[in-house]
């Protein structure tokens, strides 16, 4: 039995297409986002500092990530709270937030880095 040349051509085309798609298709790896409150509880009205650590699944720090954050009081309607994010190095980021009044606060932190799945975490804090 003889295989016709069209089938060899179809097999070759399929293999080349699969390899090309595998080489060009971006793979998203999940990142790990650790958030710690640098201030000792109870938090007080005024400035507070949070420490973020962004790593890959093997624990290697992720540098040059785009980190954004927003803070609000879930029980109140109010404008945005100023938040300043600074890259410290070795996958660490410093977040400075100003709590304008006591009560329950929520802080949403989002991190994006090339080649990684975007991560999001919401912290619920009580400010005295």
Image (spheres, rainbow, N blue to C red):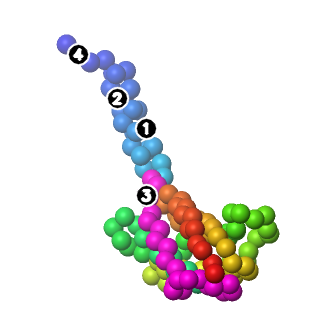
| Residue 115 coordinates in the image, percent (x, y) | 48, 60
What crowding class fits label 4: few (fewer than 14 Cα within 10 Å), some (14-19), or many (20 or more)?
Answer: few
Magenta segment: does it hold 18? no
| Residue 37 coordinates in the image, percent (x, y) | 52, 80
Query: Camera-side residue: 89 or 48?
Result: 48
The residue located at (47%, 68%) in the rendering is 33
For mark 3, what is the residue? 29
The residue located at (36%, 71%) in the rendering is 59
Q: Secondary structure at mark 3?
A: strand
Q: Earlier in the sequence, mark 3 or mark 4?
A: 4
Q: Secondary structure at mark 1?
A: helix
Q: CA distance from mark 3 to mark 2?
A: 31 Å
Mark 1 and mark 4 in contact? Answer it, CB < 8 Å: no
For mark 2, what is the residue? 11
Specify the segment rendered in magenta.
27-48
The residue located at (63%, 67%) in the rendering is 106
Q: Secondary structure at mark 2?
A: helix
Q: Earlier in the sequence, mark 2 or mark 4?
A: 4
Q: Earlier in the sequence, mark 3 or mark 2?
A: 2
> In the displayed image of the protein, which residue is found farthest to the top?
1
Can residue 68 be seen from the camera position used here? Answer: no
For mark 4, what is the residue? 2
Q: Earlier in the sequence, mark 1 or mark 4?
A: 4
For mark 1, what is the residue? 17
Q: Is 110 left, or right, of 62 in this rendering?
A: right
In the rendered view of the protein, which quadrant contains the N terminus?
A: top left
Q: Nearer the viewer, mark 1 or mark 3?
A: 3
Q: CA distance from mark 1 to mark 4?
A: 25 Å
């Amino acid at each position: 039995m003889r295989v016709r040349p069209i089938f060899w051509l179809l097999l070759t085309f399929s293999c080349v297409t699969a390899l090309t798609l595998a080489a060009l298709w971006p793979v998203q790896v999940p990142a790990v986002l650790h958030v710690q409150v640098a201030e000792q509880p109870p938090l007080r009205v005024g400035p507070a500092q949070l420490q973020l650590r962004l790593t890959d699944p093997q624990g290697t720090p992720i540098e040059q990530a785009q980190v954004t954050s927003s803070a609000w009081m879930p029980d109140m309607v109010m404008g945005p709270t100023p938040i300043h994010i600074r890259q410290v190095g070795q996958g660490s980021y410093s977040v400075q937030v100003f709590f304008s009044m006591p009560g329950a606060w929520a802080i949403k932190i989002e991190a994006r880095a090339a080649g990684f799945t975007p991560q999001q975490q919401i912290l619920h804090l009580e400010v005295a």
